[in-house]
């Protein structure tokens, strides 16, 4: 995998994670009740998720799915860190263990 395609894969994952964080922010109970604010975060989430989707489509023709999909397991880690940083969610040891198990299982399945 070249640096370009690796960066494209990271852009896909980052965009998808950003979209999920924006959706959560829009639907949060602590979100201000201004409809414009909620609409902004939903729109930002749609843009992030859409960008991630199109980055993913750009990568698909160049690699076998069984090769690139496991690499995307990093999104679980990125999402947990982003939720911690941007949404002040707690990263508990149990959550980190679960992320590790899921990521490890994905790697295990991709290697065989």
Image: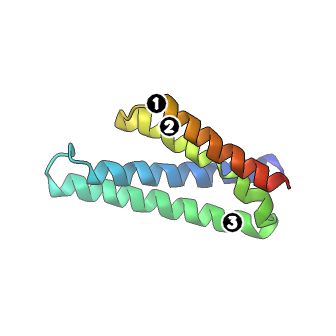
Q: Which mark is residue 58?
A: 3
Q: Residues within 10 Å of mark 3 (few under 14, many from 20)?
A: some
Q: Is residue 68 left or right of residue 84?
A: right
Q: Residue at x 31, y 53 (%)?
A: 41
- Measured as percent of width and height from the top left, residue 76 is found at 57, 46
Q: Earlier in the sequence, mark 1 or mark 3?
A: 3
Q: Residue at x 17, y 46 (%)?
A: 32
Q: Are marks 2 and 1 in contact (CB under 8 Å)?
A: yes
Which mark's residue is nearer the viewer, 1 or 3?
1
**How far separated are the C-alphas under marks 1 and 3?**
35 Å
Q: Are marks 1 and 3 in contact (CB under 8 Å)?
A: no
Q: Residue at x 49, y 40 (%)?
A: 80
The answer to whether one can see residue 4 in this image is no
**How far separated are the C-alphas under marks 2 and 1?**
5 Å
- Is residue 22 placed above or below 85 in the rendered structure? below
State which quarter of the image contains the C terminus: bottom right
Q: Which residue is mark 2?
A: 95
What is the secondary structure assignment of the residue under circle 1?
Answer: loop
Residue closest to the eye, 76 or 43: 76
Tell me which colouring the rendered structure shows.
Answer: rainbow
Q: Earlier in the sequence, mark 3 or mark 2?
A: 3
The answer to whether one can see residue 75 in this image is yes
Q: Residue at x 44, y 60 (%)?
A: 47
Residue closest to the eye, 40 or 19: 19
Q: Which residue is mark 1?
A: 92
- Is residue 106 placed above or below 61 in the rendered structure? above
């Amino acid at each position: 995998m070249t640096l370009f395609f690796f960066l494209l894969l990271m852009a896909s994952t980052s965009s998808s994670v950003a979209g999920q964080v924006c959706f959560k922010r829009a639907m949060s109970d602590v979100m201000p009740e201004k409809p414009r604010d909620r609409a902004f975060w939903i729109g930002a989430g749609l843009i992030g998720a859409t960008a991630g989707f199109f980055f993913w489509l750009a990568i698909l023709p160049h690699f076998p799915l069984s090769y690139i999909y496991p690499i995307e397991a990093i999104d679980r880690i990125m999402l947990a860190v982003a939720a911690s940083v941007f949404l002040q969610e707690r990263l508990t040891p149990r959550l980190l263990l679960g992320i590790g198990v899921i990521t490890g299982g994905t790697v295990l399945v991709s290697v065989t």
